[in-house]
Image (cartoon, rainbow, N blue to C red):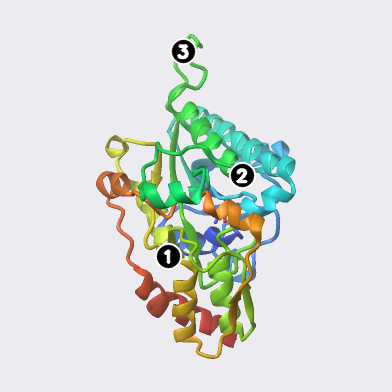
Amino acid sequence: MRKPVVLITGAGGEIGHGLLTRLAAQDPRPLITLDLNPLDRRLAGHVHREFTGSVVDEGLLERILVEFEVDCVFHLAALLSTRSEFAPATAHEVNVEGTLRLLEFAQREAESHGRPVLFMYPSSIATYGLPDQETKARVGKIREEQWNTPVTMYGCNKLYCELLGTYYARRYKQLAAEKVSGKVDFRSMRFPGLLSGETVPSGGTSDYAPEMIHAAARGDAYVCFVRPDTRIPFMAMPDAVSALLQLASAPRERLTRSAYNVAAFNPSADEIRAIVLRAFPGACITFQTDRKRQDIVDTWPAEVDDSAARRDWGFGPKYDLERAFSDYLIPTIRKRYQQ
Ligand code: SER
C-alpha cells in the first residue's frame, strides 16, 4: 500500500526550515523531502523519507510516485534572483523545468489516487517590474494584476510558473475527450523579502536586510549593497510559514486568485540599519551601492496591496517591524550565534 504523504522540495532552504518544523508539529501526514543537499540533522529528524537530488530528475520523481501517495506538494526549490542572473539557463531549468516536472508529477499522483493534489508555490515580488524610481514612488501599493513586467530571470520564471500552475488547475489538456484538469489545486503567494533568524539567505537581491542583521549579531562589519532610501516590502519568516499553511487550508471556493500578494512592513534600508543598531550598538553598517543589484531592487514595488489575501483566506501577519525584531529576529539570531 502507498502511504498518503506531504512532499516538500527545497526543504533544506530558507522557507523549508521553518515549514518543516511547523508541519511536523501540526500535520499528521508523514513528510517526504527532496533537496539537492542532505538536510541538516535537526530537520532530518522530522522527515519520514529524505530524497537527495534534483527537481529535474524524472527518474527520482518516478520513484517517489511509485512509492508514495502524495496529496500535497510544497514546491520551494528555486534559484533566487541574484544567483539566477549569473546562470540564467540553469535558473530556467530549475525554476521553470523543475516546476513543470512537479506539476506533471502532481497531476499523475492525483490521477492515480483519485484526489486533487494541493500544490503550494511561493512566488515573489520579483514578478513585478517598475520602469523607474519616479513610477515606483508614484504608484504606491500595487495590486497583483499591475506591473507584471519583471526584469529578472527569476521574476520571469516565477510569473510564468504562476500561469503554468493555473493552466494545470483549470485548463490542462483542455481539448482531450475527458476532462482531466482540476486535479492539481494550485495556490501561490508572492512573498516579499523574507527575514529569518534561523538561516542566512543566499542568492537573493533582498538579502541586504537579513545579511545586515546576521552580520551585526556575529560582530562582523557589513557593507549594504543598496542605497539607504531603498524600500521594498518584507515579512518575518514565521509569518511567511503561517501564510503558506493558512492558504493551504483555505476552502477552495473562497479563493478568487491563484497568486496572492502578502507583506507585513516596508522599511527603507536605512530604517533597517537604525533598528539593527539599536539592538547591536557596536555594529558597523555602511553603504556602498552595487549599481546593478540596485537596479533590480528599484524595479520591485515599495509596497504591495495584500487586501485579496486578507479578505479571501484571512491573511494577517503577527509581526510588525518592531515586533519582528524584538520578539523574533533578535532573540533567535542571538541564540544562533551564541551556540
Ligand atoms: N527574496 C527574493 C530574492 O531576492 C525575491 O523574492 O531573490
Give amino acid for label 3.
Answer: Glu
Front-most of residues 294 and 235 = 294
Circle 3: element type:
loop
Q: Which residue is mark 3?
A: 178
Q: Which residue occupies the extreme top position in the image?
A: 177
Q: Which residue occupies the extreme left position in the image?
A: 311
Is residue 155 placed above or below 196 in the rendered structure?
Answer: above
Instruction: Locate residue 55 relative to residue 308 in the image: left or right.
Output: right
Circle 2: element type:
loop
Residue visible at 52% across and 37% down?
A: 149
Is residue 137 placed above or below 265 in the rendered structure?
Answer: above
Residue visible at 54% across and 76% down?
A: 213
Mark 1 and mark 3: Cα distance apart in space: 42 Å
**Residue 204 in sight here:** no
The image quadrant where one finds the C terminus is bottom right
Residue 154: quarter of image: top right
Give amino acid for label 1.
Answer: Pro
Give amino acid for label 2.
Answer: Thr
Residue visible at 39% across and 40% down?
A: 144
Q: Which residue is mark 1?
A: 238
Circle 1: element type:
helix
Q: Count neighbours of disc 1 (C-alpha within 10 A) and say few if under 14, some if 14 to 19, many if 20 or more.
A: many
Is residue 16 placed above or below 138 in the rendered structure?
Answer: below
Q: Earlier in the sequence, mark 1 or mark 2?
A: 2
Q: Quadrant of ligand 1?
A: bottom right
